[in-house]
Image (cartoon, rainbow, N blue to C red):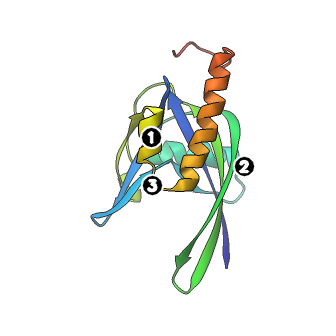
Amino acid sequence: MIEATSCGGVVIFRGKILLLYKNYRNKYEGWVLPKGTVEEGEEHSETALREVQEETGVRATIIKYVGKSNYTFNVSNDVVNKDVHWYLMMADSYYSKPQREEYFMDSGYYKYHEAYHLLKFPNEKQILEQAYADYTDLRRHNQWGTKKYF
C-alpha cells in the first residue's frame, strides 16, 4: 500500500464555493474541490494555498483548518491510501481559470446547495458541509475576513 498526503481548500467568495470540473480524455471525472500533493519541505497550509492557485488561478487566504478526509484508490498493482487536509479559504474576487494541464475544463463559484450536489465524491461533500458551517458561524459573529465581502 502506498501512503499519500494532499491538501486543499474550500474557497469562498461572497458566500459561493469554488469548484473545478475535471474531464480526462473526454471521460466524465466530475466536479471537485481544488487539492494536490504535498511537496518536500512544504507545510500543509502552504500546499493548500499553492494547489488552489495552480489549479484555479485564485490567490486565496486561509481562514481556518477544517479537517482531514481519507480515501483509497487503485493504481497499477497497488492501492493508494490518501489523507487530504482541508482549509477554509477566502478569495478576493470571482476570478478563476482552470488548469488545463491537470485536465480541469471548467471552474466557477456556486451557491452551497449547487456545489453540494455538483461534487462527485462523498468525502468532499462532507468537508464542504463542515467548511460551510464554519463559514456561516464566522459570518454570524462578524468574523469572516478583514473586509466586508457580504
Give the left or right position of residue 67, taking residue 35 as reference: right
What residue did someone put label 1 on? 115
What residue did someone put label 3 on? 120
* Disc nearer the start of the sequence (3/2): 2
Q: Residue furthest left?
A: 26
Q: Position of residue 5 (x, y in %)?
A: 66, 61
Secondary structure type for disc 3? loop
Give the left or right position of residue 112, taking residue 7 as reference: left
* Disc nearer the start of the sequence (1/2): 2
**Alpha carbons under labels 1 and 2: distance apart:** 28 Å
Give the left or right position of residue 6, taking residue 74 as reference: right
Question: Which kind of residue does numbered mark 2 sit on?
Answer: Glu
Question: Which kind of residue does numbered mark 1 sit on?
Answer: Ala
Could you tell me which residue is drawn at 57 percent across and 45 percent down? 50
Instruction: Classify the position of the N terminus by image quarter.
Output: bottom right
Secondary structure type for disc 2? loop
C-beta proximity under 8 Å, tags 1 and 2: no
Label 3 crowding class (10 Å Cα cut-off): few <14, some 14-19, many 20+? some
Q: Position of residue 36 (x, y in %)?
A: 56, 55
What residue did someone put label 2 on? 43
